[in-house]
Image (cartoon, helix red, strand yellow):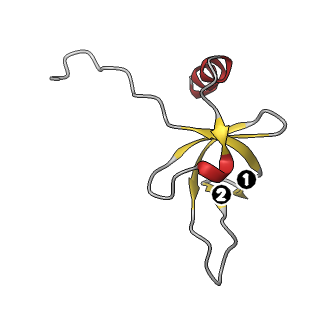
Amino acid sequence: REAVTALRSFMDGGWRPIETAPFDRPFLAMSARGDVRKCWRFKPSSRNDNILSWPRNGKFPATHWMPLPTPPAVEGEAG
């Protein structure tokens, strides 16, 4: 589902340069090969160098990012 949303956003121009990705929340990131992952960005420190991380494989070589899409409404959920 995330890949379809990401592809639609890419076609609509929703991808942004990875250098502008936020530090305070997860986002979708795309590599030069077109792989899309949910990632987090960590501020540079003595232990890392502006690392993008995803849960299963550590570092991810992303080139672009976009905000996570709003989840669909769940039937019966108030809102």
User: Could you say which quadrant of the image residue 76 lies in?
Assistant: top left
Picture layout, residue 45 above or below residue 19: below
Q: Secondary structure at mark 1?
A: loop
Please say if the residues under marks 1 and 2 sit with CB atoms less than 8 Å apart: yes
Q: Residue at x 50, y 58 (%)?
A: 23
Disc number at residue 25?
Answer: none
Disc 1: CA contacts within 10 A as few (<14), some (14-19) or many (>=20): many
Image coordinates for residue 31, horizontal then vertical, percent: 77, 41
Q: CA distance from mark 1 to mark 2?
A: 6 Å
Amino acid type at image mark 1: Phe
User: Could you say which quadrant of the image residue 63 lies in?
Assistant: top right
Image coordinates for residue 72, horizontal then vertical, percent: 37, 21
Disc number at residue 60?
Answer: 1
Query: Label 2: which residue?
Result: 52
Q: Nearer the viewer, residue 47 or 11?
A: 11
Amino acid type at image mark 2: Leu
- Residue extending furthest bottom? 46
Position of residue 25 in the picture relative to residue 50 (left or right):
left
Image coordinates for residue 40, horizontal then vertical, percent: 56, 54
Picture layout, residue 51 above or below residue 71: below
Q: Secondary structure at mark 2?
A: strand
Q: Residue at x 17, y 23 (%)?
A: 79
Image coordinates for residue 43, horizontal then vertical, percent: 57, 68
Q: Residue at x 71, y 55 (%)?
A: 57
